[in-house]
Image (tube, rainbow, N blue to C red):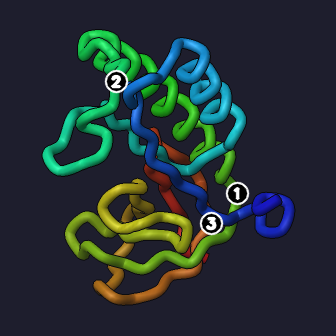
Amino acid sequence: QIRALSPEAGIRSNVIVGFPGETEEDYQELVEFVTQANLDAVGVFGYSDEDNTEALVLENKVDPELIRHRVDALSTLVDELVSERASARIGEEVTVLIEDFELQEGRAAHQGPEVDGTTSFIGTDFVVGQYVQARIVDSMGADLIAQPL
């Protein structure tokens, strides 16, 4: 529904793989969700016991090696999907907040600080804190490359 109302909206999620009791079917359901959700950014983390949490005493712990395997496999899939989503943004007009003078990069409204990729400009000279109207012209992984309008 979000994409229908606002196609340019940025949607991100974090997932934990290997929570106690997770079955192969549960994991495959997560893979299917991530594949269909069309997310802009996804953090994938493996479950680990933490002191003073209710999960510490849960039964049916998932083997740590299986958790690592699932994290690696899902992370690879997520990298591909996020890259595809970034490519789909080519042609969109965005407002970019410049955050780094030397790199001439910043964040479009759908990109969260430090975790969701950046939007870079080539051959420009903007000031940190400046908002720039731009069109996405290319992508590299989750990162976008823009041309000022």
Name the front one of labels 3 and 2.
2
Q: Amino acid at mark 2?
A: Glu
The residue sitting at 53% across, 12% down in the picture is 24
The location of residue 119, given as percent across then percent down, is 44, 62
Question: Disc 3 and disc 2: Cα gap in Å?
Answer: 51 Å
Give the side of residue 39 with respect to residue 114, left or right.
right
Report the front residue among 125 and 132. 132
Is label 2 in a helix, a strand or a loop? loop
23 versus 105 height, above or below:
above
From the viewer's perspective, tell me whether residue 121 is left or right of residue 66.
right
In primary-sequence order, the first of circles 1 and 3 is 1
Q: Secondary structure at mark 1?
A: loop
Which image quadrant is residue 37 in?
A: top right
Circle 1 residues within 10 Å: few <14, some 14–19, many ≥20: few
Is 6 positioned to the left or the right of 128 in the image?
right
Amino acid at the residue labelled 3: Arg
Amino acid type, callout 1: Gly
The image position of residue 98, as x and y in percent, is 37, 78
Residue 147: mark: none
Q: Quick check: marks 1 and 3 in contact, CB under 8 Å?
A: yes
For the C terminus, the quadrant is bottom right
Within the image, what quadrant is residue 93 found in?
bottom right
Label 3: element kind:
strand
Q: Nearer the viewer, residue 68 or 54?
A: 54
Q: CA distance from mark 1 to mark 3?
A: 6 Å
Identify the mark at residue 91; answer none if there is no mark: 1
For image coordinates 35% across by 81% down, the residue present is 126
Label 2, residues with CA under 10 Å away: few <14, some 14-19, many ≥20: few
Q: Which residue is mark 2?
A: 59
Task: Name the N-terminal-most of marks 3 and 2.
Answer: 2
- Please name the residue that numbered disc 3 is placed on: 135
User: In the picture shown, does residue 118 fall above or below 37?
Assistant: below
